[in-house]
Every structure is written in C-alpha cells, then in structure tokens.
Image: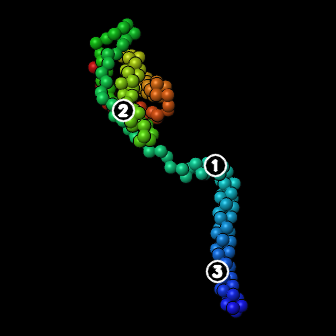
Amino acid sequence: MEKINQTEQTKKKPKNRKKLMIIIGALSLLLLFVIGVGIYSMATETPIVEMVEALRPEPSKETLVLEEFLVNLNSEGGPTNQFLKINIALGYAGSGNAETLTASMPMIRNEILVCLRELRRETVLEEESIEEFKVQAKNAINQRLDDEIIEEIYITNMIVR
C-alpha cells in the first residue's frame, strides 16, 4: 500500500512542475511586454495612456439625412424675394442615437430653420457664414437634446434663387 502512495506522488510531481513552468513562462512574457511598452513609451515620449486610447476603437459614425429645407433669405433692408433651398445631413456617433434623433425630428428641424433664418442674402455663399451656421445649428440641436449627440452638420446641396 505504501508503494502505491509513493508511485502516485511521483506521478503528481511532474504535472505540478509542468504547471509551475507554464505559469512562470506566462508571467515572464507579461513582464517582458510591460517593460517593452515602458521603453517604447519613454523612447517616443508618448504617455502610456495615449497609447491605450489609440487602441480603443472609435464609435461608429452614422448619418441621418433630413428632408429638404426652403427658407426666404433676409437682407440688410429686410425680407427679399430670394430663397435658399438646402439639403442637410446630421453626423452622429452610435446607432443607439438614431431612435432619439427620429423621435426629436420636429425639434431638430425647428432649430435648423431658426439658424437658417439668420443667414443673409449678401453672405450666404461665404464659407465663413456656412461654417458659422453649422456650428450654431449643431450647438442648438445638442442643447435641446441635452446631450452631445450631433458631431457634424453636412450640407449636401444648396441653391440660392
């Protein structure tokens, strides 16, 4: 009986030793990886936090195309017979926000119309005026949504008559 116990103990030792060697090997590889990342970080003067953030996938960007807008343009002297016909798309992150935007569509269209009415006939085609409109519309929509959902306003078509 004693010989059987010794034989079992002899068989268990190599298995335990094998597991120990695997654990030591894995820890050694992990230690080498950490040291390598540290050396790379110091050599490139890149903080480790930035390196980790670069590995994080960006949220998927979605686009919501809105129906066409048609507004009368104002002038320095008041209303004119000219109008602006414009197509706009909203750029946002995350597919979960699509339902929020669809449910808020009347409010979104209203905020865009308010911003469009501020455009003047004399400056409507200037790049600075268009960029200012985009920023105002994005900020107004996000403020009404109480969240930074809209990331970009895209103008896909614009006609002044």
Give the mark, 1 or 3, whose residue is nearer the N terminus: 3
User: Exactly how many numbered labels are in the figure?
Assistant: 3
**Residue tagged 3:** 15
Q: Nearer the viewer, mark 2 or mark 1?
A: 2
Q: Nearer the viewer, mark 3 or mark 2?
A: 3
Q: Position of residue 80 (x, y in %)?
A: 31, 11
Question: Could you tell whether 15 is left or right of 155 in the image?
Answer: right
Residue 153 visible, this orientation:
yes
Question: Could you tell whether 135 is left or right of 161 in the image?
Answer: right
Residue at (36% x, 35% y) in the render = 64
Q: Position of residue 2 (x, y in %)?
A: 71, 91
In this view, which residue lies farthest toward the top? 77
Mark drawn on residue 49: 1
Tell me the amino acid under the disc marked 2: Thr
Q: Position of residue 48 (x, y in %)?
A: 65, 51
The CA span between labels 2 and 1 is 36 Å
Task: Judge whether 67 appears above or below 72 on screen.
Answer: below
In this view, which residue lies farthest toward the front? 1
Tell me the element at label 2.
helix
Mark drawn on residue 74: none
Tell me the element at label 3.
helix
Give the mark, 3 or 2, whose residue is nearer the N terminus: 3
Q: Nearer the viewer, residue 3 or 106?
A: 3
